Image: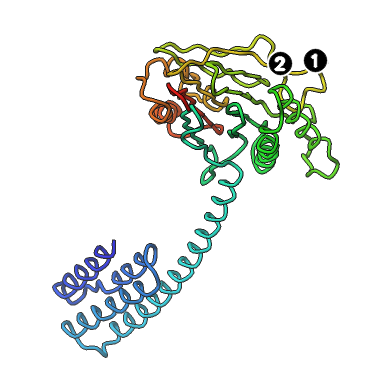
Amino acid sequence: MLLASIALIAVVTLVDIMAPPEVHLGPFLVAAPAVTASFAGPRTTARVGALAVLAQVVVATVRTTLVDLNHMIQFITLILMSAFATLFAHWRERHELKLTRLRSVAKTAQEVVLKPLPHRIGPLRIACVYLAAETEAQIGGDLYAAARTSHGTRIVIGDVRGKGLEAVGDAALLLGAFRGAAHRQADLPSLVAFLEGAVSSDLDDPAAPERGDEDPCESFITAAVLDVPDTEPALHLINCGHPPPLLVRDGRVVPLDVRNPAPPLGLTEFVTTGPSAQTFAFEPGDIALLYTDGVIEARDRDGVFFPLAERVARLPDEGPDALLARLCDDLVRHAGGSLGDDAAMVAIERMPGPS
């Protein structure tokens, strides 16, 4: 782009020298520093402006004289416009530096809230991906986390109703509660009951931020909580109003539908019985795919939802990382490059042999 600005000065200079006496192309030289200011810093912009002024001197010397009234006006105009372009480049550079710092702070905060999952936990190999609907965002209302216990691994994936900063705050609340209690609660129902208490207490807290005219019954978090033992080829699942995980085994895809799903977190006050876990076989080589509704609710131009189970069944068995990479490509392509909601996926594979 810098070479293009210099080439513009050279072309205008040559054409202006060869043009008839009544034709003056000098004003076009101001385009070079103006264009340079859009992508370069103030020093480079000032150098290009000086080069444009020098080119105008050459044109004036060859065609008439330096003290010609027409060329003098062009000199003054070119110098003033070059100075203005340099000042603009300085302002733009300061703004970009400030924006870069803000993005760095936002990225750090997002990584603190939604920590990336390790690629290996005990006998499990894990891959995760988060596709935020908001531009420049890396986290919204979707969440996932994993915690190591003395007997296995516990994993949660969830989706906060709503968007914006309130959804991020609710997601951070649930993630903090899960990380603090996953290794202390003896069984999975106790852990889910603790998470429910954390979410409900925040919704009922009078000191919590105002949620406008939102109905308290519409503030909830869907979640799927898994407990995967190290020595048992199984997984224990409690589904709190969340889309059922998919189990991939030998090219077949089976949804893990629980018989008695629990209500979303924040709504259990409307039921009398506590959550109960259901056990599914999870053998070496199996992959459990967890996802949020942003995946299955993504639509194409014709309004057709993304057929997740069908797409997963078509993919080769190459491990969780390759599975999510291909699914992300298919999902973005299906949605036309823009998702209407945040989407998160976690793929868990049980490896053969000892942990």
Q: Quadrant of residue 169?
A: top right
The residue under the point 20% across, 70% down is: 10
Q: Residue furthest top?
A: 259
SS category of the residue bearing label 2 = loop
The residue under the point 70% across, 39% down is: 173
Q: Count the marks.
A: 2
Between residues 141 and 288, which one lies in front from this camera angle?
288
Residue 323: x and y in percent read 41, 26
Between residues 139 and 231, which one lies in front from this camera angle?
231
Type of residue at label 2? Ser
Q: Which residue is mark 2?
A: 276
Residue 122: x and y in percent read 51, 30
Vertical position of residue 11 compared to residue 289: above or below: below
Between residues 200 and 237, which one lies in front from this camera angle?
237
Q: Which mark is residue 273?
A: 1
The reply to whether dot 1 and dot 2 touch (C-beta < 8 Å) is: yes
The residue under the point 77% across, 39% down is: 211
Vertical position of residue 354 compared to residue 128: above or below: above
Type of residue at label 1? Thr
Vertical position of residue 81 compared to residue 120: above or below: below
